[in-house]
Every structure is written in C-alpha cells, then in structure tokens.
Amino acid sequence: MKKMILLSLIIYSISFSQNYDKYFENKGLRVDLYQSGNSELEIITLKEMVAEKYFSGNKNKLIDNLNLGYYFVKVYNSQNEVIYSRGFSTLFQEWQSTKEAESINKSFPISVKIPFPKENVTLTLYKRDKKNHFQSIYSLKIDPKDYFIKSENFEQVEPIKLHYSGDYSKKVDILFVPDGYTKSESRKLENDFNRFSKYILEFSPFSQYKTKINIWGIKLFSEESGTDIPGANIYKNTAIESSFYTFDSERYLTVTDIHNLSQKTSNVPYDYIIVLVNSEKYGGGGIYNFWAVTSVDNPKSELVMMHEFGHSFAGLADEYYTSDVSYEDYFDLQTEPWEKNITTLVDFESKWKNLLKKDTPIPTQIEDAEKYPIGVYEGGGYVAKGVFRSSENSLMKTLESEGYNEVSKNCIESVINHFSE
C-alpha cells in the first residue's frame, strides 16, 4: 500500500510539472486591480496587466489546497479546468470592518500574480461570505497576446542572497524590501538585512526548514530617512510610502500602495515580502500573502516581525483580546473562522481537536494551562468571549511569549511544505 501511495505521489508531481509547461510560460503575469467600496459594497476594477520576469511559485504545486485567506484566485483554461489557484487577503477587507467604512467609500490597490499563460484563460476572484463560503466577485478574460499587457523593462534590481538553498521555483522565497533608508545608510541596511534574516532562520519552526528557504534583499533607497507618522504630523518621502496610524491605529504600520511595491520588486523572485522600515517607533502589520511590515530599531522589532510574518506567511489570527483595535465584530461567532489558530467551536473538528489529550475539558480553564499545554482557552480574535485559542500564551497573543504555539507551528510547516520541495 505504501508503495502504491508513493507511486501515486510521484505521478501526481510529474503531471503537474507537465501541466505547467503545457499551460504557462517561464515568467509571471501581474494583474493590478483596485478594490473599492464601503462596509457593505465591494467593486473590483482593472488598472493594468504587467508581464514579469519571474513566477517564483512551485511549478509542481499549482493548486492551493490550504484553504487560507479571505480571497482566492483561480485561473481557468478554455475547458473550464482550474490550472492555477492561490489564497490571499487584503487591506481593503480589513478596512471594511472599521467604523470609517460605514460612512465613506475608499479604494485600495491590490496585485494578483499568476504564471504567464500560453493560451487564453479566465482569472476569477472569490471572496468568503459571512458563512466562509467562497463566492465569485470578479472575472477577467486574459489573452496573453494582448498588446496592452505591459512588458516594460523596470529598473533592474539585483537581489542580494542573504540565505540561499537552491532554485527559487523549489523553495520558499522571502524578500526583504527596505523603506526609509537613504543612500548614506547603505551599511545600516546591510546590517539590518543580515540581522533579520538570521532571526527568521533561528526561530522555530523556520529553523527546522532552512534547506527549504531562500531569503533575499534588495537595496532600495529613499529620499528621506524614516517613515510617515501622521499622528505626529511627520511625513517622509520614501520609496515604498509606508506609514503608521493605518485605520487611525498608532502602531499599525502598513504599505497601502501595493502597485508601487509590486513594480519595485517586479524583477526579483519571491513568494513573501517583508518590508523593513527604518524607524525606532514600535509597530508593524501583516496580511496573508500580501506583505509583512515592521520597524527595525525598536527593542521588540524582531519579535514584531515574527508576529506579523505569522499573519502574512500562514494566515494566523491575532490571539489577543485586550488591546484596542480599529475593527468591529471582526469574527462572526456563528461561523468557524478560516484561520487555523482560533476557533468559535462551530466546527472544532476542522481545527486542533485531534491534538487534545483525551481528558481535555472544552473550554479549558487558564488555571489548568500547565496540565493542558494544548487546550481550548477562551479569548482571542480581539474579543474575550466566544473565540478560543489553543494555548495560554503564544507569539500571536503577546510578544512576551517564547514563540508560536504548536497549532501555529503546524500551520506554518504546512505552508512551507506546500510551496517547496
């Protein structure tokens, strides 16, 4: 039986490799879109399509079966077969849950990247409804011979190999993108690259998968040092235009112009982006398959990076519930969240129930945390009641913890193994 399973896996891998060559060119296609609307409305519009030098995803694993992200992109061939898919989340979706979204309309840029098709395809975007079922919200027919697909020679940025394990199409590729570094701070940038790269590779579970990971950096300089801090009336001219006070939350450090970020990185192979912001102010942000952002000179910057990377790399939810946030009713307590590290107990079978000891009470009391290191502890997802986490503390709850809990580690490992060989 084991031999039959192994043979099936080998055939499956070979067939997907052949499918890539059958359906796609050895490069990428970036589809730049806008998400517009308010708390109740979402409209997707096309800005442009751009041919890119790389498609850095695993050519043997074109179909995403992780079931992560608020959105999902699928590419269909002319026979209506799915030939590529991937989940992701966006800043717009977060904004929709804020008070501001109830009263005004806004637009947010997003970039969707797919392998460059050889023949006509249809790209379709799906979004989860209130019951977490994916519903189609946008479709685009793509003719690869369309002369409106840009193939501009953007500024050639030579990536720096900070940790190299092999062919980018067979590894998880992490790219550091700097913001707020001037040319005179080039040496500092190099030191920060090395410091944060080393920290990732020493942090469990990434430390156990070094041979499956590449880490790159690009030297991208800004006119001014630092970043925007609107609450202090500080605005800087920087390459990526990062900013604190996103959604009027002081510590929420993000990059809103994803089109600019995508263009600046269009000649570099990567699966995940971490933006390093040259600031000592505490803060960061992370969105699944979108980006992670952190300041670099705060005493807690390294831990902030790993917390935010938990969001952007594996779609992990925040497990804290006492800090002020801009979101309102972010999780529907009548629906099981798609995030792997929290539960509403609506469908606990799909989460970590199989990891519990047989006598583990549900819910689990905090005073029993030592007895039940993996339990069902109430509080998480920004609320004290109705959402549960698997451990008393973890990096997704507090920076005072020792790292990710076992449930989060399992999720991170599944992502690493899915997108690498």
Image (spheres, grey):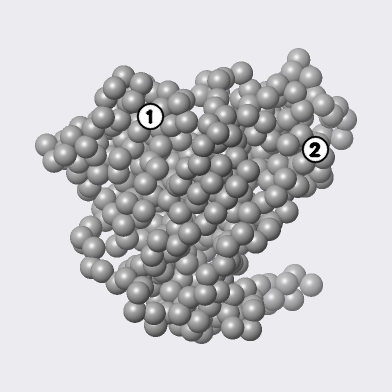
Depth check: give the residue in front, 50 or 412: 50
- Distance from the alpha carbon under mark 2 to that under mark 1: 33 Å
The numbered dot on residue 408 is none
Mark 2 or 1, nearer chain start: 1
Q: Which residue is mark 1?
A: 244
Q: Quick one: quadrant of the N terminus?
A: bottom right
Q: Note whether 327 is above or below 72 in the view shown.
A: above
In screen coordinates, is 356 left or right of 56?
right
User: Label 2 belongs to which residue?
Assistant: 334
299 shown above or below 327: above
- Rendered residue at 45%/26% (across/down): 248
**What amino acid is at disc 2?**
Gln
Question: Pointer 2 and pointer 1: residues touching (CB < 8 Å)?
Answer: no
Local SS, label 2? loop
Give the residue furthest to the top: 367
Q: Does residue 304 appear anywhere in the picture?
A: no
Residue 300 percent coordinates (x, y): 41, 24
